[in-house]
């Protein structure tokens, strides 16, 4: 349901026949104007055309989310944020400088 809601608000929806006829124009829309195109077959979503950098970001996100250690680290960080357990950048730099000097 999320994909349908997202794509209907964001993407240009075209049937596969129109996609074939207007492929060059649709590719330009995606590459140059960063449009999204949802291709339908028999009225149902079949494929999506998105800018390549967005595709690469989705691939990277999927890779990160498939790594249990990375997900655990993200969850731990979010929990620290919710408990307001944060360190300012200045404090972090000062601590690192002190640690280096102690070596």
Image (cartoon, rainbow, N blue to C red):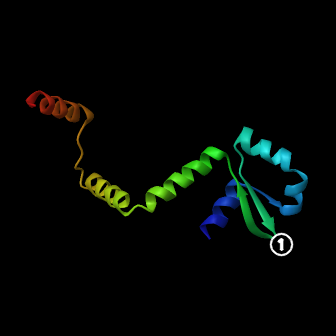
Residue occupying the point 30% across, 53% down: 77
Residue annotated with mark 1: 42
Q: Relative to residue 64, is residue 80 drawn left or right?
A: left
Q: Where is residue 65 drawn, in percent x and y? A: 45, 60
User: Quarter-wise, where is residue 25 in the image?
Assistant: top right
User: Quarter-wise, where is residue 75 in the image?
Assistant: bottom left
- Mark 1 falls on what kind of element? loop
Total number of numbered labels? 1
Outermost front residue: 103
Outermost left residue: 102
Q: Where is residue 10 drawn, in percent x and y? A: 68, 54
Compare residues 88 and 32 and report the one nearer the observer: 32
Q: Residues within 10 Å of mark 1 (few under 14, many from 20)?
A: few
Q: Relative to residue 72, is residue 13 drawn left or right?
A: right
Compare residues 11 and 102 and report the one nearer the observer: 102
Q: Relative to residue 47, is residue 102 drawn left or right?
A: left
Residue occupying the point 79% across, 65% down: 40
Residue occupying the point 55% across, 54% down: 59
- Note whether 83 is above or below 88 in the view shown: below
Outermost right residue: 21
Q: Where is residue 30 drawn, in percent x and y? A: 73, 45
Residue occupying the point 22% across, 49% down: 85
Q: Relative to residue 78, is residue 84 drawn left or right?
A: left
Compare residues 22 and 100 and report the one nearer the observer: 100
Q: Where is residue 38 drawn, in percent x and y? A: 74, 59
- Location of the N terminus by quadrant is bottom right
- Location of the C terminus by quadrant is top left
């Amino acid at each position: 349901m999320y994909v349908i809601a997202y794509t209907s608000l964001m993407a240009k929806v075209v049937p596969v026949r129109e996609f074939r006829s207007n492929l060059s124009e649709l590719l330009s829309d995606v590459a140059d104007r960063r449009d999204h195109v949802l291709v339908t077959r028999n009225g149902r979503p079949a494929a999506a055309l998105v800018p390549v950098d967005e595709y690469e970001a989705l691939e990277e996100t999927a890779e990160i989310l498939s790594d249990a250690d990375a997900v655990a680290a993200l969850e731990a960080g979010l929990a620290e944020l919710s408990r307001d357990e944060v360190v300012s950048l200045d404090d972090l730099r000062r601590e690192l400088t002190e640690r280096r000097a102690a070596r």
